[in-house]
């Protein structure tokens, strides 16, 4: 059975580029950052920033329309869409719990929720991350709490633009990832503070290795008014000092080794690293928000005049490290639905693979059965042909055997006459030589004396070609005045003698 491959289309397994989108919705700004993911590399593809200039009463509906207009022409995949919760919209608490068992820590966090927030448990959405454990059996836990109204607003806006998301992340985690790219030396093994300056909000985040250890809001907005630059800088220094003190009071950890400032270019351009470092008492490094960030931008960033007034560092970090984020503020009901969908998809895929395997095995089995049937049919046909030839050969063999027998019988008499002639005495006359065809020979004759007959009998017995030589009778009678002895001898011919031809002798 031949299978033609000419009409079979082989599917293409060419790897496609994936687009990851981060969206931040505040009361005043809309920010969109997209990253292009291919193989193991990711690059920032697009940055869109727009101010929301709409009346508050119709804000969500108008915001949805504005997002819908912004998303026109963009490739948005709901499976890789991240909505950002600004740190200012979440309540962050650092807890020390007397356990290192993840299951026990989960129960303890659920018990502490009611004490840490003024809201009822069903009014909030929370998530937590275990930061550290010690030899005394205690664990450091960071708890993040967001009111349901904040999350519900995001879903309502997305619903109006016909989008869904499965991850709502905390902006502080994005800032940590941003720093991994922006700082070529990497995150050190000592605490470092990241200060992100934005147009309407700023925050102070302490990171250690690969974790966010502490977060605090800074009540200072970006300013590019030169007339109040000195006053604004003094307020920034004061807020940084208060944040450092709050970190030491809450965690009592190692002292901060360095402060990194980033964010809106209009604000950080007026800052001096050495001056800030000397006044705060900790080394300060100012890093532009897109420094060392892998880019594949479709248009230069300078084409967007609003980029100088806002920060997209957190969004950049989140799309470059998706889905590594630890915090996710998706409501429990939606998480269960997602898990059920994933299980259903897994069951569907399992069923599909199982059917494919069964069909493949069945196809192989049926193919083997078909091939065996074809082979058996062919064997039967060939057997019949061989049988016909064998029957012909058998008939020919029988003819040849018959010819051999006839040929043997044709010269057989000469054989035993020749042998008898070699042993018979001259005084003996044979009157009858008879052969029955089955190996029995009869000799009759006369002799002048009886002794010659017995001598002839002994000669026959000594011959290797005659066996069981016996005398049937010996009689003496007078013929013409002379005594003659008549005799009859019977014997069997030896097998080899039968097969010999006269020519051999």
Image (cartoon, rainbow, N blue to C red):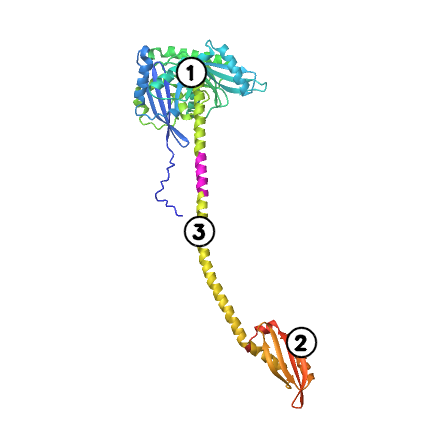
How would you classify the magenta stretch by its main secondary structure?
helix
In this view, the mark in front (2 or 1) = 2
For residue 394, above or below residue 63: below
Res. 32 mark: none
Element assignment for label 1: helix
Q: Where is residue 168 in the image (x, y as percent from the top left)?
A: 41, 20
Magenta residues span 353-365
Res. 87 mark: 1
Res. 377 mark: 3
Residue placed furthest toward the top = 118
In this view, the mark in front (3 or 1) = 3
Dots 3 and 1: beta carbons under 8 Å? no
Q: Where is residue 490 in the image (x, y as percent from the top left)?
A: 64, 76
**Foreground of the two, 9 or 58:** 9
Q: Residues within 10 Å of mark 1 (few under 14, many from 20)?
A: many
Q: Does the magenta stretch include residue 149?
A: no
Q: Is residue 359 magenta?
A: yes
For residue 373, above or below residue 386: above
Nearest to N terminus: mark 3 or mark 1: 1
Q: How far apart are marks 3 and 1 (CA)?
A: 79 Å
**Foreground of the two, 499 or 78:** 499
**Quarter of the view holding residue 477:** bottom right
x 43%, y 33%: residue: 352
Element assignment for label 3: helix
Residue of label 2: 470
The answer to whether any part of residue 24 appears in the image is yes
**Image position of 154 (left or right of 403):** left
Q: How far apart are marks 2 and 1 (CA)?
A: 134 Å
Q: Position of residue 473 (x, y in %)?
A: 67, 79
Nearest to N terminus: mark 2 or mark 1: 1
In this view, the mark in front (2 or 3) = 2
Dots 2 and 1: beta carbons under 8 Å? no
């Amino acid at each position: 059975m031949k299978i033609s491959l000419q009409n079979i289309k082989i599917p293409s397994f060419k790897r496609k580029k994936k687009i990851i989108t981060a969206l931040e919705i505040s009361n005043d700004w809309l920010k969109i950052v997209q990253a292009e993911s291919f193989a193991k590399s990711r690059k920032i593809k697009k940055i869109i920033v727009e101010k929301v200039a709409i009346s508050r009463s119709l804000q969500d509906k108008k915001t949805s329309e504005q997002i819908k207009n912004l998303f026109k022409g963009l490739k948005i995949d709901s499976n890789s869409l991240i909505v950002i919760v600004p740190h200012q919209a979440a309540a962050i608490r650092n807890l020390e719990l007397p356990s290192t068992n993840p299951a026990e820590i989960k129960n303890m966090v659920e018990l502490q929720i009611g004490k840490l927030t003024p809201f009822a448990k069903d009014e909030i959405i929370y998530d937590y991350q275990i930061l550290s454990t010690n030899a005394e059996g205690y664990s450091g836990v960071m708890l993040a709490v967001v009111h349901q109204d904040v999350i519900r607003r995001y879903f309502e806006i997305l619903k109006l633009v016909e989008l869904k998301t499965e991850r709502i992340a905390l902006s502080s985690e994005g800032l940590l990832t941003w720093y991994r790219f922006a700082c070529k030396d990497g995150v050190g093994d000592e605490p470092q503070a990241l200060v992100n300056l934005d147009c309407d909000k700023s925050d102070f985040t302490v990171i250690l290795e690969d974790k966010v250890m502490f977060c605090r809001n800074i009540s200072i907005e970006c300013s590019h008014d030169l007339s109040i630059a000195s006053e604004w800088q003094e307020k920034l220094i004061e807020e940084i000092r208060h944040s450092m003190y709050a970190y030491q009071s809450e965690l009592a950890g190692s002292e901060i080794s360095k402060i990194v400032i980033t964010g809106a270019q209009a604000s950080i351009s007026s800052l001096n690293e050495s001056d800030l470092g000397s006044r705060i008492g900790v080394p300060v490094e100012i890093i532009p928000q897109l420094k060392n960030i892998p880019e594949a931008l479709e248009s230069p960033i300078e084409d967007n005049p609003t980029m100088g007034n806002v920060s997209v560092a957190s969004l950049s970090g989140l799309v470059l490290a998706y889905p590594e984020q630890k915090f996710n503020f998706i409501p429990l009901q939606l998480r269960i639905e997602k898990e059920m969908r994933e299980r259903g998809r897994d069951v569907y895929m399992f069923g599909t693979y199982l059917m494919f395997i069964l069909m493949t095995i069945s196809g192989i089995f049926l193919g083997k059965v078909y091939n065996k049937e074809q082979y058996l049919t062919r064997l039967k046909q060939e057997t019949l042909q061989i049988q016909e030839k064998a029957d012909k050969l058998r008939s020919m063999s029988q003819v040849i055997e018959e010819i051999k027998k006839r040929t043997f019988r044709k010269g057989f008499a000469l054989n035993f006459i020749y042998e008898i002639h070699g042993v018979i005495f001259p005084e003996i006359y044979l009157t009858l030589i008879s052969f029955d065809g089955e190996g029995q020979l009869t000799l009759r004759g006369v002799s002048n004396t009886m002794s010659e007959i017995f001598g002839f009998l002994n000669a026959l017995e000594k011959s290797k070609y005659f066996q069981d030589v016996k005398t049937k009778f010996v009689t003496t009678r007078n013929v013409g005045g002379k005594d003659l002895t008549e005799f009859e001898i019977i014997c069997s011919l030896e097998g080899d003698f039968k097969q010999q031809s006269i020519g051999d002798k």
